[in-house]
Amino acid sequence: MCLACRGFHPVLSTRIYPMQLNRALSVDAEPYAFEFDPGRTALLIIDMQRDFLEPGGFGEMLGNDVSQLRRTIDPNRKLLAAWRSAGLQVIHTREGHRPDLADLPPAKKIRGLGKTSIGDPGPMGRILIRGEPGHDIIPELYPLPGEPVIDKPGKGAFFATDLHAILQNRGIQRLVVTGVTTEVCVNTTVREANDRGYDCLVPEDCVGSYFPEFQEMGLKMIKAQGGIFGWVSDSGRILAAFGSSVT
Ligand code: C5J
């Protein structure tokens, strides 16, 4: 039973019958099985924003191969559908800044010495600025009303946001962290979460990097040394734990 809506989902206005909320589930994962109580586990989807993922966006304009990120869309869609249909907690994040750039550290603005930087006009509006089309989440994973969207100025989702308060208020102890990019915002968020006492599971097909070597190492760094930052699995093994036939 969803504690927030007592089984009556306020957004969908339909009765939700959570699949397995009364017992802990076990996901086949590395370095060992990830056990979780679904009612206390949030799906945290990091920065699936148009400028990072869409052909013609800022990421591609910089010469990146967006197909490396786009392969994560379908597995994320399936996981999101399972979380929603079970009435579980879903949280989305977006990296971006205020239009007046007041929350943009000068060091982040000038980093890279590129011709184009945060706040400049890009192919989908001003780059990484809240309210611009490129800053928004891709339509395939668009948040439903009622799903928190965390606007974060940094790489980690806990820095200068109310994410920790939301998770505490909703009794969340474990996170399934997906999104982009594996070695930057996903890794930073997993490390921040780890230090705050959350256990994190990262499904490898639901996270992406423009650089295959960073994808591989980013995942290895999470699960090394007995799961020093968390666990790694994939969407198929998580859905299997639910016994879900969601496609
Ligand atoms: C994210 C970035 N979301 N790579 N941002 O990873 O700058």
Image (cartoon, rainbow, N blue to C red):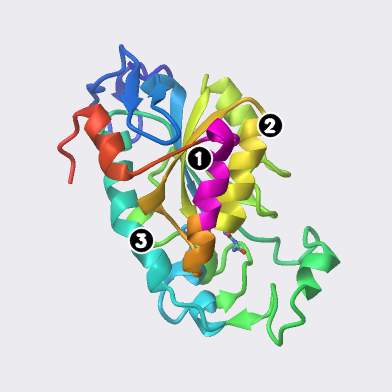
Q: CA distance from mark 2 to mark 3?
A: 32 Å
Residue 184 colored magenta? no
Question: Mark 2 or 1 closer to N-term?
Answer: 1
Q: Which residue is mark 2?
A: 195
Residue at position x 51%, y 71% in the image:
51
233 sits left or right of 114 in the view: left
Q: CA distance from mark 2 to mark 1?
A: 22 Å
| Mark 2 closeness class: few <14, some 14–19, many ≥20 residues within 10 Å | few
51 sits left or right of 104 in the view: left
Inspect the image, locate mark 2, and give the three-letter code of the amino acid beneath it. Answer: Asp
Of the pair 121 and 51, the residue shown nearer to us? 51
User: Ligand 1: does it lie within 8 Å of the C-beta at label 2?
Assistant: no
The answer to the question of whether label 3 and label 1 lie on touching residues, with beta carbons closer than 8 A, is: no
Query: Magenta part of the protein: which range?
Result: 217-230
> Of helix, strand and loop, which one carries label 1?
loop
Q: Which residue is mark 1?
A: 148
Of the pair 141 and 60, the residue shown nearer to us? 60
User: Ligand 1: does it lie within 8 Å of the C-beta at label 3?
Assistant: no
Q: CA distance from mark 3 to mark 1?
A: 16 Å
Inspect the image, locate mark 1, and give the three-letter code of the amino acid beneath it. Answer: Pro
Quadrant of ligand 1: it is: bottom right
Looking at the image, residue 27 lies above or below residue 215: above
Magenta segment, principal secondary structure? helix
Inspect the image, locate mark 3, and give the three-letter code of the amino acid beneath it. Answer: Pro
Q: Which residue is mark 3?
A: 139
Quadrant hosting residue 126: bottom right
Question: Mark 2 or 3 closer to N-term?
Answer: 3
Q: Residue furthest left?
A: 245
> Of helix, strand and loop, which one carries label 2?
helix
Q: Position of residue 12 (x, y in %)?
A: 28, 35
